[in-house]
Structures are given as C-alpha cells and as structure tokens.
Image (tube, helix red, strand yellow):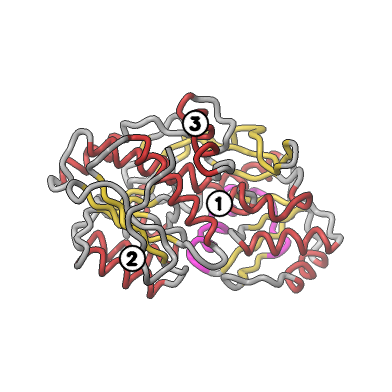
Amino acid sequence: MKLKTILMAASVAALAHTAQAEGVKVGMITTLSGGGAGLGIDVRDGFMLAIAQSGSTDIEVVIEDDQRKPDVAVQLADRMIQSDKVDILTGIIWSNLAMAVVPSATAQGKFYLSPNAGPSPLAGAGCHPNYFNVAWQNDNLHEAAGAYSNDAGYSNTFILAPNYPAGQDALTGFKRFFEGALAGEIYTKLGQTDYAAEIAQIRASGADSVFFFLPGGMGISFLKQYADSGVDLPLVGPAFSFDQGILQAVGDAALGVMNTSQWNKDIDNAANAAFVTSFQAEYGRLPSLYASQGFDTANLLLSAMAVADVNDADAFRAALEAANFDSVRGDFAFASNHHPIQDIYVREVIKEGDVYTNRIVATGLTDHSNAYVAECSM
C-alpha cells in the first residue's frame, strides 16, 4: 500500500502529515529542496514507511522544508511548538541547523529525536534529557575512518571537510583515531562545488592518502573533479560521501573506495532485510543510510508510545532510553548522553548490475560510543 499524505504545506516544497488528529504530534523539519534535498527526502521516506507499517492511528506528522537555512528552521520550529502544538520534533539533517533548533526546543519541554545531525556540543556540555540522537554522534564514522586508515598502512593523510559543526567534528574524530601524520588539513566552504584549489594542494602535499567529509552535492562535485584530476591517491571517507543516492551521480569514480558506516543494506538481521525489501517496493529505489536512520527513529518513537504517554515526560523519556525496538543495525543502545552505542563498519563501493552500492568488508569499531559522555552532566 502506498503511503498516504493528507496535507500539503503550500508555503514550502514539503510533503505533509498522515494519521489522526489525536495522540502524538510530530513536527518534522528537514531538507527537501536544494543541494541537500536527497538526504532529507530519504529521512522522511524512511520515517513515514515505519509509521505506515505500524498501522498506528495515534501519530500525526507535520513535515516542512528547512531549505538548509538555520533561520527558516528556527521559524518552523517556533511555529510547530507554539501554534501546531507538537509533542516531538525530528528531521534535521545539518548540524548548524540542529544547533539553532534543538536547545530551544528542549528548553520548552519538547522531545527532539535526531535522525541525523549529532554535533558534539549536544553530546557533551549541551546535552539534555529530552534530546536523543538515533543516528550517531558526529565524530563516530570519522573515528572509524581514522582506525581504518591505520589498518590500511596510511601514514601521511591529507584531510578536508566543510567549515561547519559537523565538518569540525569530522576532522576531530578522524584525528582522534588516526596515528599517522597529516600532509594537510583544510576546511572548505559549506556548499562549495569547485575543488580545483584543494585538489592542487593535495597533489603538492606529498600525501599517501586522502580523507574527506563532503556530504550531499559537495561530495558529488569533489569525487568527479578528483577522478578527472589524475591524482592517484586512495580516498577514505564516511558513508555521507558514498551514500546510495550520491553513488549513482558519481558513478565509476567511486568504485573501490572504502568508507565507514553504522548501516548497510547487507547487515544480516531480519529487521534490516525486511526494511530493504519494503523500502525498495514502496519507493522504487534502494534505501540509503539516511532512510535507515529515519526508519529507526520512527520505530524508536513507536516503541516508547507503546508503553508511555508523551505527556508523562519522565515515563516517556525512560521508554526512549530503553530503545526497545528492532533496529535495522542490529544491536542498538543509548549511552548515558543519549547517543548510540553501536558497531561501525568499513564498506567498499561496488557495482551490482547497473547500480552502484556498498558492501561491508570489515567491522571498524565494535560497540562504539562517543568521546563526550563524561562532559554530559545529566
């Protein structure tokens, strides 16, 4: 059965809500237009698939497009909290938007379930009892990339990422685990599409490898330009630059690249197999990392709703902390700062027929938490 939408927000390019007028009301603010639209669309679609599969009539989801602009996200959050009277917020992709929205939302007594952005301040000193990240803490996949680079024998790596909270966390995480030297370190402009200058610096650096974090359209641009440049250094990155949607746009330039992720379509458990099959049947494409995170976020919410009333904040918080749902990742638990403890895998980009995708080749980090637990006072 196809997902049913019953409200179209005229002011922005977004799907809108499903379900009934009573029960839990969820405000989803995510990126549905512009260069990062694919990420938000996948989070939305994964979330809504889980709601549809649950058959719940107790959830109303209002979905809006943040246009990847912090001021728009703040305006939407204020409206959802004050006028729409949502109980829970979710959906944000970008860490700079999360930093603009989450502290205010939790200060007003709302729960925030992050299906993606996990900036370090919200894991450390800025943690909050009502904030849960269902994806990862920003550093995590980059920490695994640093560990993999050690195993691969790289000793002089050039690293780059966009200059915003997730980019800063990315390079911090990589450096935390990488034991070699740095041939260079660059912060690029968020949304940048021309990387000629950076590739020239890589060429001249004497590096033996490159680690980069460039999500969405940024990664597509960099990978294509890197492939055309003739620079022949191995690339390592997180899944965000080698995700299902990105790979189709990049093509052969990504083949063989190793990247790190807490999820892949070949994780061997019943929940993941069913998710991959049902997502592809529903939407006509393979799910991405972002879709898996949206799906898990909705199922976490549903698991809490099954045992607690959202109006009883303490009971609902305890139900979220229990994480009593079948994650597509397999084993899943929250650390005391409400960020996941989970395995992180090393994947290789491959081609299956005409489709570019990933396969797991190793486990990079096992039962991995995050570096900021001790800084969180809750």
Q: Name the residue at 70% across, 44% down.
A: 356
**Kind of residue at disc 1:** Arg
Q: Residues within 10 Å of mark 3 (few under 14, many from 20)?
A: many
Compute the Cα span from label 3 to label 1: 31 Å
Q: Name the residue at 50% across, 61% down.
A: 166
Q: Is residue 71 above or below residue 117?
A: below
> Which residue matches tag 3?
272
> Which residue matches tag 2?
101
> Which residue matches tag 1?
176
Is residue 130 one of those drawn in magenta? no
Q: Position of residue 251 (x, y in %)?
A: 75, 51
Q: Name the residue at 33% across, 70% down.
A: 74
Q: Secondary structure at mark 3?
A: helix
**Front residue of this view, candidates 146 and 252:** 252
**Kind of residue at disc 3:** Asn
Q: Could you tell me if the residues under marks 2 and 1 are in contact, i.e. CB atoms within 8 Å? A: no
